[in-house]
Image (cartoon, grey):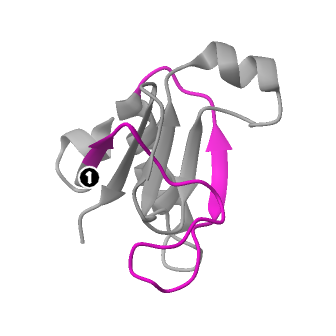
Amino acid sequence: MDDVLEGRTSFTEYCFTDWPNGAEAADGRGNVTDISRTTVDAFEACMEACAKYNKKAGDSGTQCRAITYNANLTSIIETGKQGGNCFLKDKKGVDLQGSAESACAAIVA
């Protein structure tokens, strides 16, 4: 968690929140898009995945601006269609009520 721990990337965390793919963006400009998915064991690891994605993409690609994490791996595996439990987003979404296992975070500009 080098980038997050060293303070180069800061996030605002939102508990019991979901920003699903296609949801309205918080800034009113379009919709949220999942740009990548992965499976991780902790909320912090999902934020780190976002920071690493941006480091790899550099200035030339779409940047990760937010994440949605689901701690319930059993439900993710059972549905099988999710492709992971950590969803990297191109923008913060409008706050929607999520389950007790879901949380979101957005990069602080």
Which residues fall within the magenta stretch?
13-42
Q: Is residue 23 magenta?
A: yes
State how many labels appear.
1
Magenta: main secondary structure: loop
Q: Is residue 83 left or right of residue 26?
A: right
Instruction: Please rate how many residues cluster around mark 1, counting C-alpha atoms within 10 Å: few if below 14, some from 14 to 19, many from 20.
Output: some
- The residue that appears at 46% across and 25% down in the rendered structure is 101
Quadrant hosting residue 33: bottom right
**Spot occupied by residue 18 in the image (x, y as percentages of width and height):** 48, 47
Quadrant hosting residue 89: bottom right
Q: Is residue 103 above or below residue 34?
A: above
Q: Nearer the viewer, residue 18 or 67?
A: 18
SS label for mark 1: strand
Q: Residue furthest bottom?
A: 29
**Spot occupied by residue 7 in the image (x, y as percentages of width and height):** 17, 50
Q: Is residue 106 left or right of residue 59?
A: left
Q: Is residue 33 magenta?
A: yes
- The residue that appears at 30% across and 39% down in the rendered structure is 2
Q: Is residue 15 left or right of residue 41?
A: left
Q: Nearer the viewer, residue 34 or 23?
A: 23
- The residue that appears at 33% across and 35% down in the rendered structure is 1
Q: Which residue is mark 1?
A: 11
Q: Residue furthest left?
A: 7
Q: Is residue 81 left or right of residue 95?
A: right
Q: Nearer the viewer, residue 109 or 73?
A: 73
- The residue that appears at 64% across and 37% down in the rendered structure is 38
**Spot occupied by residue 22 in the image (x, y as percentages of width and height):** 66, 66
Q: Residue furthest front?
A: 97
Quadrant hosting residue 39: top right
Location of the C terminus by quadrant is: bottom left
Q: Is residue 7 above or below residue 61?
A: above
* Badge 1 amino acid: Phe
